[in-house]
């Protein structure tokens, strides 16, 4: 039985997503199976995106003082 998506680590979700994509790309799945795979793949993609967003929010950048010494940390600002 497949693990619930919300319990998967990023790495496990990504691995399963790669398997889903491979199965879909093979063209061997029936239409019903393809729909089920697509739906699971979309949920796995969302899980990976959520995990990456949470990881990014936890990253901190080191602030330097005028002399270039570490003076603290601030939230990472992507972009």
Image: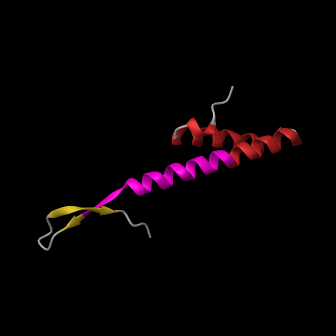
Q: Position of residue 54 (x, y in %)?
A: 46, 52
Asked if residue 73 lies in the magenta stretch, the reply is: no
Q: Residue furthest right?
A: 31
Number of numbered discs present?
0
- Tell me which corner region of the image, top left, top right, bottom left or bottom right, holds residue 76: bottom left
Q: In terms of image quadrants, where is residue 4?
A: top right
Q: Main secondary structure of the magenta part?
A: helix
Given the current orientation, which residue lies at the most extreme left position?
67
Residue drawn at (17%, 62%) of the image: 70
Which residue is painted at 63% across and 49% down in the image?
45
Residue 36, given in percent of the width and then of the height, sits at 79, 41
Report whether 57 appears left or right of 6.
left
Image quadrant assignment for residue 23: top right
Query: In which quadrant of the rendered image does the C terminus lie?
Result: bottom left
Q: Looking at the image, which residue is at 62% across and 38% down? A: 5
Color theme of the render: secondary structure
Q: Is residue 2 left or right of residue 62?
A: right
Q: Give yes or no for residue 46 being in the magenta stretch.
A: yes
**Farthest bottom residue in view:** 66
* Boundaries of the magenta span: 43-62
Residue 44, image x, y percentages: 64, 45
Q: Position of residue 24 (x, y in %)?
A: 77, 44
Q: Is residue 53 above or below residue 44?
A: below
- Whether residue 33 sits left or right of residue 40 in the image: it is right
> What's the residue at 49%, 55% (across, down)?
53
Quadrant location of the N terminus?
Answer: top right
């Amino acid at each position: 039985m497949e693990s619930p998506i919300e319990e998967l680590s990023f790495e496990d979700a990504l691995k399963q997503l790669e398997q889903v994509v491979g199965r879909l790309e093979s063209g061997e799945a029936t239409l019903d199976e393809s729909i089920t795979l697509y739906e699971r793949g979309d949920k796995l993609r969302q899980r990976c995106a959520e995990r990456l967003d949470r990881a990014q929010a936890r990253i901190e950048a080191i602030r330097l003082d005028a002399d270039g010494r570490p003076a603290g940390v601030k939230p990472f600002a992507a972009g």
